[in-house]
Amino acid sequence: MDTPTLLAHLETHDTPVRLPRGGTLCWDDADLHRAAQASDPEGYALLALAPGVAPWQRARVLLQTLAASQAGLDDPTRATLARLAHVLTLALPPAQVITVLLALRRLRANHKHTTRAILRFVLEHPDADALIAARRPALTDCFEHALGKTTARGCARRVADGDTGSDYLRRRLLRFLADPDAALPRVNALYGPGDPAATAPGDAALTLDTPRRQPPTVTATNRGDIAATLVHLYRGAHDEDLYVALGRQVAAAVADLPPFPGTLALVLDASASMRGYGEREWALLSQTAALRMVLEQVCDRLEVVEVGGDERAPRGATDLACGLLDALARGPDLVAVVSDGYENRYPGDLARLTAALPGAGVATPVVFCHAQFTAGDDLTLRRPAPALPQRGFWHQDDFAELLPWMFGHCAAGQPWLRAALRVRLTDLHRQAAHLTTRSAA
């Protein structure tokens, strides 16, 4: 599985999965998803939880994960996939999940893990009552696909007659559910009259990516806590409390991040342009320093190569090519060039150097991290090496997407990425369980 390519695709390709009436399921990247899932079922599925993945791509991962057989997978992997499927059915808009479940019906996919995921969505979703009222025919089709039409209707008849725990129900329905007491009345609703005026909830029950709005006015000190504290220090403040706060803020930023087991070389642009001036003074350099401080805590070994001056005294021009050569000489698993993109010394050198590296036998991955003042910065003239993988950051919150993208480019980063996404899955699954319990109450 080519993680960087797949992750970039998951973040940018947000076309819907279409299910024409009586036609063939249409998703234009099905082969890519099937190949990725076949090569690494757990790693592929976990990528759906990476920050910034498009909703319809998460729906595709859910579809492929539920459609594929789990024969040959060990129990821990099956448990991870089950938790992830449950999280995604709550974290996607219900309309998208219903499309996925109907697509599984069209594909005739009916494994036990598929059955469990369908039944838990139809009967145990926090908004199940409203969904059944508004989308009863579709959800009935999903229910009957999960159990088989004859079995589903047999269960419905028994539930309608007051059966709540017979051997028949336990073997065919109840064993797939987490909360049978809440689910059984909904079986009756599936075969009831419905409500033509009902409206289905449009929002997901569980939030994966918290929407982040750029403030009306971006300043040097509203770009995250670490950078704001650094700006005060760079401007001459010497209060001991600031250093204490800085340590606390860095610790909070890395609290849920696993250690990166490899060596990262950071080419850090400390030229005069990174300091800025006026209201933007120290904005870029403080955010770059914040990234370095986070990486120092995360990486087993971090090699920093400063270009120009240093963080406290930025000066001079930007010789990124020499900085890259110095970084490669230290034998890292990955090189990250962090700069505002103004290569004002020997322009074009970085592009020529990176183009020549493969021919020289250098296979170390190199990525370019754009330090920006706002998310809307014009980077047209700030791409010194257009062929390099590139990603921008302007706020501390961007690190949540930047680090997985960065580490995903090297072999040493694959265990880190998997561990980080497992931590995220554990937290989201805990939230999902709380939602289900609260709705049942």
Image (cartoon, rainbow, N blue to C red):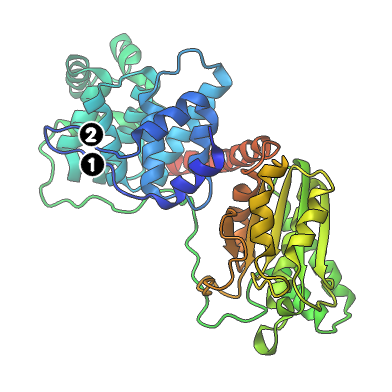
Question: What residue do we see at 52% from left, 24% from top?
Answer: 79
Quadrant in the picture for residue 58: top left
Mark seen at residue 39: none
Under circle 2, the secondary element is: loop
Question: Which residue in the rendered view is the most extreme toward the bottom?
Answer: 278
Q: Is residue 110 above or below residue 192?
A: above
Under circle 1, the secondary element is: loop
Amino acid residing under circle 2: Leu
The one nearer the camera, 348 or 437, is 348
Quickly name the residue at label 1.
18
- Res 179 seen here: no
Amino acid residing under circle 1: Arg
The one nearer the camera, 106 or 176, is 106
Residue 427 in percent (x, y) is at 58, 43
User: Which quarter of the figure is the C terminus placed in?
Assistant: top left
Q: Earlier in the sequence, mark 2 or mark 1?
A: 1
Q: Is residue 163 above or below residue 270?
A: above
Q: Is residue 271 above or below residue 264?
A: below
Question: What residue do we see at 52% from left, 72% from top?
Answer: 380
The one nearer the camera, 389 or 241, is 389
Residue 119 in percent (x, y) is at 32, 28
Q: How crowded is the residue under tag 1: few (<14 C-alpha within 10 Å), some, or many (20+)?
A: some
Question: What residue do we see at 83% from left, 48% from top?
Answer: 329
Question: What residue do we see at 21% from left, 20% from top?
Answer: 152
Q: How crowded is the residue under tag 2: few (<14 C-alpha within 10 Å), some, or many (20+)?
A: some
Mark seen at residue 25: 2
Residue 147 in percent (x, y) is at 26, 19
- Res 28 seen here: yes
Tell me if label 2 and label 1 are in contact, CB under 8 Å: yes
Residue 361 in percent (x, y) is at 72, 40
